[in-house]
Amino acid sequence: MKMQFGVALVLVGLVCSGAAEPAMCQYNGGPEETPAVSGYEQQLTGEIRNAIKGFSPKTDNLGNLYVTLGTGAPHRLIVAPIDQPGYVVSVITSDGYLRVQRLPQRTPNAVFDLLHAAQPVFVMTRDAKRIPGVFTGLSVHLQPGRQNAPAMAHPDEMYVDIGASSAEEVRASGVDLLDPISLAQYPQIIGTHEIAGPAIGDGVGRSVLPELLRLLTDHKKEISGTLTIAFAAQQWTGGRGLDRLLNELHPDELIYVGRIMPPRIQESKPAATPPHEAMTPGTGVLIGVSDASAALSGLAAELKKIADSHNLKILPVTAAPPAMTGYAKATPLPARFAHLGVASLYPVTPAETINTADVSALQTLLYRYIAGKDAPRFEGGFAGSHAATLGDLRELTETYGASGHEEAVREEVKKLLPNWAKPETDAASNLVLKLGNAKANSNAKKIVFIAHMDEIGYQVRSIEPDGRLLMDVLGGGYTEYFLGHVMLLHKADGSTVGGVLELPAKWDQPGFEWPRGPKAMDEPAHMYVGTHSAEETQKLGIKVGDWATVPKQYRALIGTRANARSFDDRVGCAALIEAVKTLGPHLGDRQVTFIWSTEEEVGLKGAAAAAERMAKEGNAPDFVFAIDTFVSSDSPIESKRFADAEIGKGFVIRAVDNSNIAPREYVDRVVKLAKDNKIPAQYGVTGGGNDGAVFVRYGAVDVPLSWPLRYSHSPAEVIDTRDYDALAKIVAVLAKRW
């Protein structure tokens, strides 16, 4: 019987090459992973069932899935949980947001809710659709002086935005109460042998067991007694699936393949450092026992003997047994019981990290225990990638370029401009395009439109002796949106390495509070790249000056709304490109300059250099229209006292911000031109600075133009593309008629 296992391995993206050496596993990319919030594992269960259908799997009404091979005694059960912590929709608000309830209802750790703030998510509907959305987050520019802002660390302060503007739109999308919600799961390779991402630790067993079945395909007759391989539901909510399996199957022995959790500490006792702090990826297979200092016995001792005899790394650790809690007494574990797992960094966070060699060793150990021999080598993998024709905005958004490292963005802008456009790069690395043929003595107004190419990120200051990177901040943002999350490190040769920004000290201790305040945003952070010495890190080609960003993807939401990191200011860059296309090469007796600037997020540096250069050349503009974000309070967790511009209602004149006040006569003039051309317009007051402010000292009037943005400086940024269209149109109108 030839078994096909591509789908099962995609569940966590791990592909193992075999079990004889032990095998090496790798992450081959592919589509986002299938979430399985506890109690709502049905879609994932269906995928596993389809992958192992040749074994005639069975399911029960709780959601457990299992395969039984052989007959007679002893009855051995190998079980892995398949669920993960997440949320369900608890309320749909009248203005289209989702309120949530956590599952499990008790938080897995002190930072679980907080690390969901301003992150991309999926809502899983009853008909198995994945509706993209984001958790709301505070916009940093709106918080100075604000009193009693939400901490974003509890479901009472959490909302999900799927782009809807009413409860009716939410339900029309297929979303309803009780639909599960989880982080968008895009695992990232860290260094050479590690993988990080949401729910990585929850997916180890559910990846290994389908492969174990595949390896046993040709050896079923050699199995002594009865072997059941099971995928358990609802482990995070009381171990209900495991309890059901034990009660129904009555196995003689149990190998539980799941998280190794520290022993439960009584709240009356002082907190101790959890054992997982001493475990690092690469430790090998972990055996969870009640006391790691005592000699192993029974099944645990047998497994360790097998591992030692085949040079498999294995380590006994003190751990809590698999949870089975409820209102009735749990079914007892069999006398012959072993708990296997692998070490992870930052367990149950968006940046949880495991080592693929550990997963391989676990798979090898299980096969050798069942079959008593080496496994055949398996060259696994899955195919499948897709390409789509992307618009200018999508192309720019998905191009990386932190402050001071805008090269790729600049090249993308040049590529997207029409062939007739001949921009130049100035000494500050700004891209400059001049339109119009006004003579030097012409009365034509000199006008500049400027949008910045850079995005916030981090830069390598130094490589620590232990291999970690000390990272400086490039632009401000709430640290909880980045620390404890996966990052991409961009090397000088253009390639990337995955990394994890480390969480603050004692993040997993009871009573932990996230460091707050403006100073915390500027503090350097450490990045883990899967190495343990400076030499190892250098072998990866990492150097001082390399830079890091959040991995990102343009995600369409409901209707005309979308989510991506770096809409600030790629929307402005794209709007200028669209305006140039509309204007064409022959602007007549005008003097209009388009600038795509550098290093705005670290102090308007590119714009300042351009303003000084133009002034020295005697060509300082009369008017500058800075095209940048209007940080909007269009969010259920923001104060509506100011910045109250709604997304979808048109471009915004950024009349007042921290760097500039636009004269009202010019605000009104822009509004009139917009009205005359049937372009929806808004105007208002917000926070932050804009590139046009540095031109004012040379005599220019700064009239900033914007689009409203939710959740600024976060991975959850949300726009309405109608506002982008309005912005591009008003730029073209102003270039011709101002």
Image: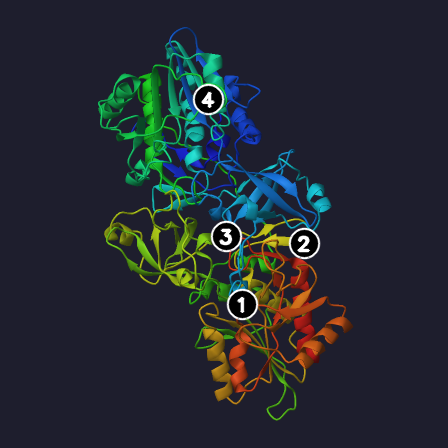
In this rendering, the answer to whether 252 lies above or below 196 is above
Sequence order check: which comes first, mark 3 or mark 2? 3
Q: Amino acid at mark 4?
A: Leu
Q: What is the crowding at mark 4: few (fewer than 14 residues within 10 Å), some, or many (at least 20)?
A: many
- State the CA–CA distance, disc 3 to disc 1: 42 Å
Sequence order check: which comes first, mark 3 or mark 4? 3
In this rendering, the answer to whether 213 lies above or below 472 is above
In this rendering, the answer to whether 490 lies above or below 326 is below
Residue lying farthest front?
268
Measured from the top left, where is residue 390 in percent x and y?
59, 54
The residue where tag 4 is placed is 242
Q: What is the crowding at mark 1: few (fewer than 14 residues within 10 Å), some, or many (at least 20)?
A: some
- State the CA–CA distance, disc 1 to disc 2: 26 Å
Residue 151 circle label: 3
Drawn side of residue 36 relative to residue 303, left or right: right
The residue where tag 2 is placed is 560
The residue where tag 1 is placed is 414
